Image: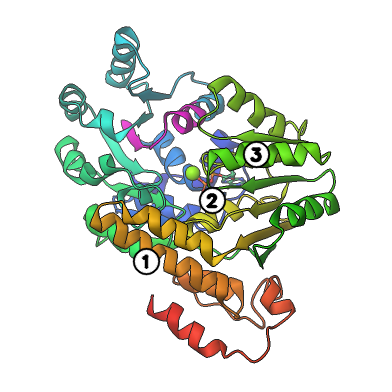
C-alpha cells in the first residue's frame, strides 16, 4: 500500500462520517502510514483515538492497541465496531475473556478480520500471546495513555515499563504513542523508555481558553461550595475530594442543603457506582462528589464547574480533572480550595513511601504549592508547566482566572515565573 494512493479524507468520511480532520490528525496518520514512529501529545478530547483507528482500518493486518483499562478498551471496541459495516473489526485480548472467546479472537486475527486488537500490557507479556502475535501480520502498534509509562505521570503503571522489549519481540513495525499528559518530564520519559527518540512529535496546545481558574483559601469550605453550587443551580458539576470518607460526608451535606448530589468512589459497589455515574450523565443528578476514580473516559460535554474540595497531588491531576469542565467550549469554572495544612498532610503520607516515590511525590506537591500561591496568571503558570509559552495579556483566555481579573498587589510576579521556568 502506498500512502500516496490513499485518499484519507474519503476514508475519514467513509468510516467515521466526519468531513474534516481535527487538528493535526491527517499529518499524524500520514506519517504513521509512511512507516514513521509518531508521538502525539494532545489534550483530552482532541481526537487521539482516530489517529490510530483510521490507519488501522485501512491497513493490511492487525494493529495492536495497548490501553490501560479494560473499561476504556471495551468502550472503544464497541465504538469502532459500530463504525464499520463489516462486523467485529475490533477485539480485546485480556483477562476478561474465557478460553473459547480467546480462541475466537485469535482465529479472527489469523483470518485477517481483526483490524484493531486492544490489549492490556499485562496480557501482552504472556508468552502464548507473544508467540501468537509474532506469527501474524501486525500493521503497527499504538500505545494509548502513554504517560502510564512514566513515574512522573499521574497514572504510573509498572506493566507499561517493559513495553519496548515486548513490542520488539512481536514485530518490527511503526509505533504511535499518544497521551494527554505533556509535561516535559513525562514526554522525555516516554520517548526514552519506548526508544522513540527519532519519532515525529506532534504537540497541540494545552490551553483551554474557556476555563476559568480560581484558587480560594480553604476557609468555611462547606459553606462556600454550597453557595457556589446554589449560584449555578441546575448546572452539572463535579466536586473532587481526596478521601472516600470525605466524598460520602460531603455528598450528604450537599443533599441536606437541598442540592441534587451523589457520591462516587472506588469503595462503592459496582452497581451503585455505575448507577450514580449514569444519573449524572443523564442529568437526573446535578452534582457528583467524587474521588479521582471518577472521570477517566467520561465524556459529558456540558460540565459547568469542577470544584476541588482538596488540592490535588499534582498539577497534572489538577489539569486533567479541571479539564472535564466545558468540553463543549461553553462555560467551565474551576474552583480549588487550598490550605497549606493539606499539603503537610500529603507530605506526611508520602513520608511512608519508598524513597523514589516520595521524592517524585514531593516535587509534584511543590509544583502544586507554587501554582496555588502564585500571583501570576494561572493559565500562564499551568501552560509553562506543560512546556508552553503563554501571553498573559493577549493570549487566548488571558483574563480567565482570579489573578488576571483582580491582580494581587505588591507582589513581584517575576520570581514566580523564574521558579516555574526552573521546574
Ligand atoms: P482523546 O482520546 O484525544 O481524548 P477522542 O479520541 O476520545 O479524544 O475524541 C474526542 C471526540 O472527538 C470524540 O467524540 C470523537 O468522535 C471526536 N472526533 C475525533 N476526530 C474528529 C473529527 N475529525 N471530526 C469530528 N469529530 C472528531
Ligand atoms: Mg483517548
CB of mark 2 near ligand 1 (< 8 Å): yes
Cβ atoms under marks 2 and 3 closer than 8 Å: no
Label 3 environment density (alpha carbons within 10 Å; few <14, some 14–19, many ≥20) = few
- Measured from the top left, where is residue 97 in percent x and y? 35, 16
Element carrying mark 3 = helix
Element carrying mark 2 = loop
Residue at numbered disc 3: 249
Q: Which residues are magenta?
A: 60-77
How far is disc 2 from disc 1 in space, using C-alphas?
Answer: 24 Å
Sequence-wise, which precedes: disc 3 or disc 1? 3
**Residue 147 is one of the magenta-drawn residues:** no
Quadrant the N terminus occupies = top left
> Can residue 297 be seen by looking at this rendering?
no
Residue at image point 54% right, 29% down: 79
**Residue 74 is one of the magenta-drawn residues:** yes
CB of mark 3 near ligand 1 (< 8 Å): no
Label 2 environment density (alpha carbons within 10 Å; few <14, some 14–19, many ≥20) = some
Quadrant the C terminus occupies = bottom left
Residue at numbered disc 1: 363
Looking at the image, which is closer to me, 176 or 35? Answer: 176
> Can residue 305 be seen by looking at this rendering?
yes
Sequence-wise, which precedes: disc 2 or disc 1? 2
Looking at the image, which is closer to me, 95 or 314? Answer: 314
Amino acid at each position: 500500500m502506498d500512502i500516496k494512493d490513499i485518499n484519507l479524507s474519503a476514508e475519514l468520511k467513509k468510516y467515521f462520517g466526519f468531513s474534516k480532520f481535527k487538528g493535526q490528525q491527517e499529518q499524524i496518520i500520514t506519517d504513521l502510514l509512511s512507516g514513521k514512529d509518531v508521538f502525539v501529545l494532545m489534550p483530552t478530547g482532541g481526537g487521539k483515538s482516530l489517529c490510530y483507528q483510521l490507519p488501522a482500518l485501512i491497513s493490511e493486518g492487525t494493529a495492536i492497541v495497548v490501553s490501560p483499562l479494560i473499561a476504556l478498551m471495551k468502550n472503544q471496541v464497541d465504538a469502532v465496531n459500530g463504525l464499520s459495516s463489516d462486523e467485529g473489526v475490533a477485539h480485546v485480548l485480556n483477562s476478561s475473556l474465557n478460553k473459547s472467546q480467546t480462541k475466537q479472537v485469535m482465529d479472527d486475527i489469523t483470518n485477517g478480520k481483526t483490524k484493531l486488537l486492544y490489549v492490556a500490557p499485562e496480557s501482552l507479556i504472556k508468552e502464548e500471546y507473544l508467540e501468537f502475535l509474532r506469527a501474524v501480520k501486525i500493521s503497527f502498534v499504538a500505545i494509548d495513555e502513554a504517560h502510564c509509562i512514566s513515574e512522573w505521570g499521574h497514572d504510573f503503571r509498572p506493566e507499561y515499563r517493559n513495553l519496548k522489549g515486548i513490542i520488539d519481540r512481536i514485530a518490527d513495525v511503526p509505533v504511535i504513542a499518544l497521551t494527554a499528559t505533556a509535561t516535559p518530564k513525562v514526554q522525555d520519559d516516554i520517548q526514552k523508555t519506548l526508544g522513540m527518540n527519532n519519532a515525529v512529535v506532534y504537540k497541540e496546545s494545552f490551553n483551554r481558553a474557556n476555563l476559568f481558574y480560581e484558587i480560594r483559601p480553604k476557609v468555611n469550605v462547606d459553606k462556600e461550595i454550597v453557595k457556589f453550587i446554589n449560584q449555578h443551580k441546575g448546572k452539572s458539576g463535579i466536586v473532587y475530594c481526596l478521601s472516600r470518607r470525605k466524598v460520602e460526608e460531603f455528598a450528604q451535606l450537599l443533599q441536606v442543603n437541598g442540592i441534587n448530589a451523589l457520591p462516587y468512589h472506588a469503595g462503592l459497589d459496582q452497581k451503585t457506582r455505575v448507577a450514580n455515574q449514569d444519573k449524572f450523565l443523564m442529568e437526573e443528578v446535578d452534582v457528583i462528589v467524587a474521588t479521582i476514580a471518577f472521570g477517566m473516559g467520561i465524556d459529558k460535554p456540558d460540565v459547568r464547574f469542577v470544584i476541588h474540595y482538596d488540592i490535588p497531588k499534582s498539577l497534572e491531576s489538577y489539569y486533567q480533572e479541571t479539564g472535564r469542565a466545558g468540553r463543549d467550549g461553553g462555560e467551565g469554572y474551576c474552583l480549588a480550595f487550598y490550605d497549606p495544612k493539606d499539603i503537610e498532610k500529603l507530605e506526611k503520607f508520602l513520608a511512608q513511601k519508598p524513597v523514589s516515590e516520595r521524592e517524585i511525590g514531593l516535587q509534584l506537591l511543590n509544583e502544586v504549592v507554587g501554582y496555588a500561591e502564585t500571583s501570576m496568571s494561572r493559565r500562564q503558570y499551568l501552560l509553562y508547566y506543560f512546556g508552553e509559552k503563554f501571553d498573559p495579556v493577549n493570549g487566548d483566555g488571558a483574563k480567565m482566572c482570579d489573578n488576571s481579573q483582580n491582580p494581587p498587589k505588591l507582589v513581584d510576579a517575576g520570581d514566580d515565573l523564574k521558579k516555574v521556568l526552573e521546574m
